[in-house]
Image (cartoon, rainbow, N blue to C red):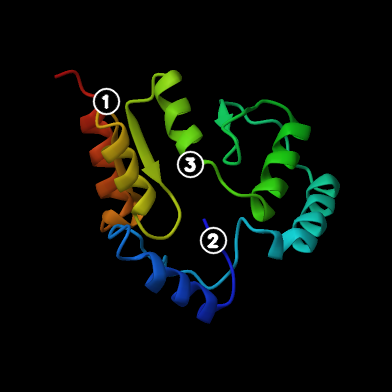
Amino acid sequence: MLAGTSDAIAHFVADFQSMNPNLVRLPVSIPSHSHYLAAAAESFRAVLHASSIVAPRVTVLGSVDATPVRSRDDAINALSRQMSTTIRWDRCMDALVEFGVDTAIELGPGNDLAKLIEVVHPQIKARALNDFGSYHALADWIAVRKSPI
């Protein structure tokens, strides 16, 4: 991931597109997961500390390095770190395999991460929330995935 001004990113993509035709500029306008959001991450950490956030009931993998999040403090750390730290999606995808995950749903905007999961780990069926016309369609897809074949 690379974050910077729009012009700098455009020049970078233009310079390296011929070496890597798969290089794409993601349609984002916020420099998420970069040092540009360090101050916001610290403010967010303070808000989370003051909140009633609790430990997750199921295993959650932190997106920065795929470390399992099991406590309240782990959750606060993972959520605030991911705002201003590079996400290691490669580690996250590998961890899904290690945990025996066979189905994944991307909740954020777009479907790039779901597509990448299926390319790198084709044994995992992945879709993005916005691939479905409704939550009912998503629920139907999950139900089919859970049915014995």
- Residue 119 % position (x, y): 27, 40
Check disc 1 and give the amino acid type: Lys
Q: Is residue 17 left or right of residue 5?
A: left
Along the viewing direction, whichever of 32 and 22 lies nearer the viewer: 22
User: Looking at the image, is 99 positioned above or below residue 16?
Assistant: above
Dot label at residue 89: 3
- Residue for point 33% across, 44% down: 116
Marks 1 and 3: CB-CB under 8 Å?
Answer: no
Residue depicted at x 34% and y 39%: 117
Per the rendering, the mark at residue 2 is: 2
Q: Residue 67 sits in which quadrant?
A: top right
Q: Of callouts 1 and 2, which one flags the residue occurring earlier in the amino acid sequence? A: 2
x and y, in percent, of residue 125 in the image: 27, 34
Above or below for 92 versus 137: above
Q: Is 97 or 52 nearer to us in this picture?
A: 97
Between marks 1 and 3 in the image, the one whose residue lies nearer the viewer = 3
- Which amino acid type is marked by label 2? Leu
Callout 3, which amino acid? Trp
* Residue at horizontal 76 percent and vertical 59 percent from the top: 38
Upstream in sequence: badge 3 or badge 2? 2
Gap in Å between the C-alphas at discs 3 and 2?
Answer: 14 Å
The residue under label 1 is: 146
| Residue 94 vertical position relative to residue 119 in the rendered view, above or below | above
Residue sitting at x 32%, y 31%: 103
Residue 132 shown left or right of residue 109 in the figure? left
Q: How many marks?
A: 3
Instruction: Give residue 65's position: percent from left, percent from top.
Output: 59, 35
Query: What is the C-alpha distance between the residues marked 1 and 2?
Result: 37 Å
Q: Residues within 10 Å of mark 1 (few under 14, many from 20)?
A: few
